[in-house]
Amino acid sequence: MPALWLLVIVLILAAAGFVAGRSRAMADAQGDVRNLHSLPVYYGNHVMLAVLLPAVLILGIWLLLQPLAATQVASSHISPDSYADTGALSLIMSDVQRVAEGLNRAVAQGLISASDANALDATTTDVRALSVSAGVPVAAQVTPDMLAAAEAVRHVSAIGSWLMSGVVLAVALVAGFVAWSQITKDFRARNTVERVVKGLLILAAMIAILTTVGIVLSLLGNTIRFFGLYPAMDFFFGTTWAPSFGGGSELGILPLFWGTFYISIVALIVAVPVGLFAAIYLSEYAGPKVRAFAKPLLEVLAGIPTIVYGLFALLTVGPLLMKLFGQDGTFGVTWMQGGTSVMTAGLVMGVMLIPFVSSLSDDIINAVPQSMRDGSLGLGATKSETVRQVVLPAALPGIVGAILLAASRAIGETMIVVLGAGAAARLSMNPLDAMTTVTTRIVSQLTGDADFASPEALVAFALGMTLFVMTLGLNIFALYIVRKYREQYD
């Protein structure tokens, strides 16, 4: 049974459990709500959660583990002589998965019967063409080993699907019946439901924390491997970035950090004044009609994909700057050699960051109590004096947080930098020179057939870990600033 239909059935059972639990409680209380320990809805929720939670948990775990089990079984059908390393085996197994999916679709579309699909011979049948005709492209020619592995995947998946359906439905029914049988008019349903909901909230918080921890650990292991192959001093204090998979690489991070810092500063110089002034106008001076029109229009900028901003930098801003500062430009001095530069990426990234600063700052300024404004105006201060001396200092912790959020966003940006800033790793003060950043080099080092035993590939993890530590320090500094000023206005 497909997982989606199985989930729908579980939801129907949960709804039925809600009705049954509520009805049983009311029947035991002889129809009088006053005889119940908890409200009737809690008895229904008790049965509903008992049906839903274990069934969905098992369904999720099963869907994660079944493909791994199918791949493990199928890989035993691949001859070790057909691949050189685990990377090559992964590519073969990817094709095997597509062949299995193609055969399943071919059976579903009536291109081939189920019995014929199970009896295919790769030496006499073009399995690849059959899979393509079913709408699933396969990169390599299908060998007998690959076909056998694909059949194993189909077999394990089919058996696993039926077992999953049986186990999930059985658990849902048994758990629901046990919960239903516990219900009496004196059963503390509210306490039980609230404990379960509290546990779910704790689980959600733990998932977020554990995800962060997992990301750090995954970076940390490969970072340690990198520093075992490449000197840390050369990495942190080297001024040359010249990776070479043939050997003799120079992997100094300073040019990348300088490019990241320089582009981020230009972006913040654009975004912070514009965004902050826009927030002040919208919250303190604009009328309701202007605010209702301008605020959503300004926030549209946040919904534009970064690749579109990158194309805007490449096709519009870069050529415009070339007309001003390039060869034969308006100023008659060649300060810019090409359309890609720090200024190109920084200006466009600043436009992208404006809604981050303006929207958050606007909400924070609006949160300043009106009594503070009224007190200032009552003492004779003007509107502008009240904004400068009362509203902005009171909102400063939140505004600093908004600015640092924008800074973190700028540091992690990739597509605008790739298309707008170029790929040159250099230490230069000229904002019209092409430069690159840490994030673009991470993508570059992991693109293609990367050998994760070489420092040229592992350096991407060291770059990511260093970037993580840098943004963590930025957030700690922001927290310090927020707490310092909050003490003055709390």
Image (spheres, helix red, strand yellow):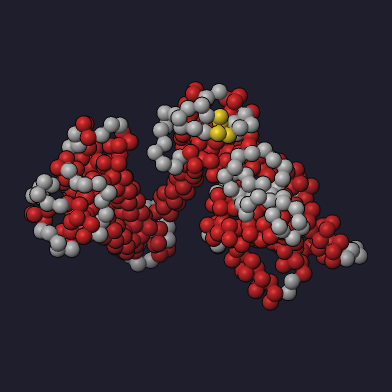
Q: Please give left or right for residue 422 compared with residue 151 in the image.
A: right
Tally the numbered discs: 0
> Which corner quadrant of the image does residue 36 belong to?
bottom left
> Which corner quadrant of the image does residue 310 belong to?
bottom right
Q: Please give left or right for residue 105 compared with residue 416 in the image.
A: left
Which residue is pictured at 60% across the width and 39% down the height? 425
Would residue 221 be seen by someone viewing this image from the given angle? no
Which residue is pictured at 16% across the width and 40% down the height? 145
Q: Say which of 285 and 318 sits in front.
A: 318
Q: Say which of 158 and 413 sits in front.
A: 413
Place of residue 306 in the rendered image (x, y in percent of width and height, measured from the top left): 55, 57
Place of residue 363 in the rendered image (x, y in percent of width and height, measured from the top left): 67, 60
Place of residue 103 in the rendered image (x, y in percent of width and height, measured from the top left): 18, 54
Q: Please give left or right for residue 22 compared with residue 316 in the image.
A: left
Q: Say which of 414 and 291 sits in front.
A: 414
Place of residue 344 in the rendered image (x, y in percent of width and height, measured from the top left): 65, 54
Would residue 299 be seen by someone viewing this image from the given angle? yes
Q: Quadrant of the N terminus?
A: bottom left
Which residue is pictured at 41% across the width and 52% down the height? 193
Most distant residue in the bottom direction: 289
Which residue is pictured at 27% across the width and 49% down the height? 139
